[in-house]
Amino acid sequence: MSSMSPTQICTDDEITVRDLIVQASKAGASLYNGQPVGVLLEHPDNEAELNSKASESALMHQGVLRQFPVPKKLLVILNWKMRSQYREVPVSMTVGALKHVVEEDVKRVLGGKVWKYEFQITGTTTRPEHETPLLNLTHYPARNICLDVLREGESGPVSTSQCPSVNEHLLRKHLTRGRFQSGVDQGLWRLVSISWPEAIFAVRRREHERLSHEALIRFQLDKYPLSAPVIDLWDIDRQSTIEPIQWPNWFRNFVVRHYQSFAVIEPRPYSPAVLEISEAIARRLKEAESESWDSSGDITQCLIGLLTSFRSELSEVNSAGRSHTQPSSQQRFTPA
């Protein structure tokens, strides 16, 4: 290899990660899940990394874009009607193979009775073909797929979800980004459903004998992302909101701490519970200003606040010396 002059070395040191990814994109390079390398340029989460020097980036090795290894396992979140199931599956598995595994599980639970199921990508009306590799449904670099489990015949023909508004389009785009998908990979939260302008999300903590390990929150997103969402605690069994008098302490604390920064509570008829919460909010606002909603951010700024409050309730129980169960890697389930 010929030696480089000091001028050439200086020039090479100033090459950014963005420069090399652009070159790789023009050459038709792809990521491990088949997506073009250019998707790395589209995510605001990557902005700092893209502007860093190529020689200092973990994305590069000796001036060449790293070929990240294909993950050995994928996380599949199966959303049943009243619950969710987390599964780790081989990266080589197809949609049809997963469908077979689920149907065999149900068959064992029901003592031999056969039920047929179909999968629908959560938040859409799209049903992937059976031959589709599950890896193709992931968003790089996340390793998860969220699927709704439907009894055969419960869903219509395969279709593509339409986004009639810019707001909904932005939300769906944000849900494919690293910040949200990383939380899904870690089992912190998941999307339950979207029926614009409403969306339901679940935040998750370790299972506990006295506390629910998942809480569902309904977001009203008419003005997303310009304004913070209007939120309600959601009862999935009754398919309705939970009234303030029934709010658990962690949710009351979240409302008091974050109104109007990361969440806006829907106006409600007078009740002693609402009055007490309003007084606590007023005292908090007098003491200090809270962070404000960032319209250039995404839905995770609200989910992080909810998750922190939800998990703090578990900490309070543990600090009181009460026993708790360890999280299981596989949830026991019965078919919907």
Image (spheres, grey):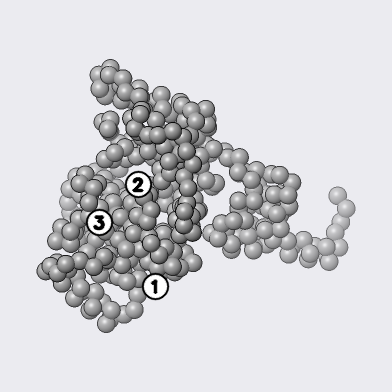
> Residue placed farthest to the bottom in the image?
286
Residue 295: % across, % down: 45, 68
In terms of image quadrants, where is residue 171?
bottom left
Most foreground residue, 221 or 101: 221
Left or right: 267 as drawn, with respect to 161: left
Would you name the residue on which mark 3 appears? 233
| Residue 12 coordinates in the image, percent (x, y) | 77, 61
Give the alpha-carbon distance from disc 1 to disc 3, as whole Å.
21 Å
Q: Residue shown at 83%/66% (left/top)?
A: 7
For label 3, count other residues whose C-alpha is less than 10 Å away and answer few (under 14), some (14-19) or many (20+).
many
Q: Nearer the viewer, residue 71 or 118?
A: 118
- Mark 3–mark 2 distance (CA, rounded to whole Å): 13 Å
Q: Position of residue 310 (x, y in %)?
A: 28, 57
Secondary structure, mark 3, is strand
Find disc 2 in the rendering and name its residue.
192
The quadrant holding residue 220 is: bottom left
- Name the N-terminal-most of marks 3 and 2: 2
User: Looking at the image, can residue 329 be seen?
Assistant: no
Of label 1 and label 2, which has the lower sequence position? 2
Is 267 displayed left or right of 53 in the figure? left
Q: Amino acid at mark 3?
A: Leu
User: Would residue 39 be found to the left or right of residue 213 on screen?
Assistant: right
Q: Amino acid at mark 1?
A: Ser
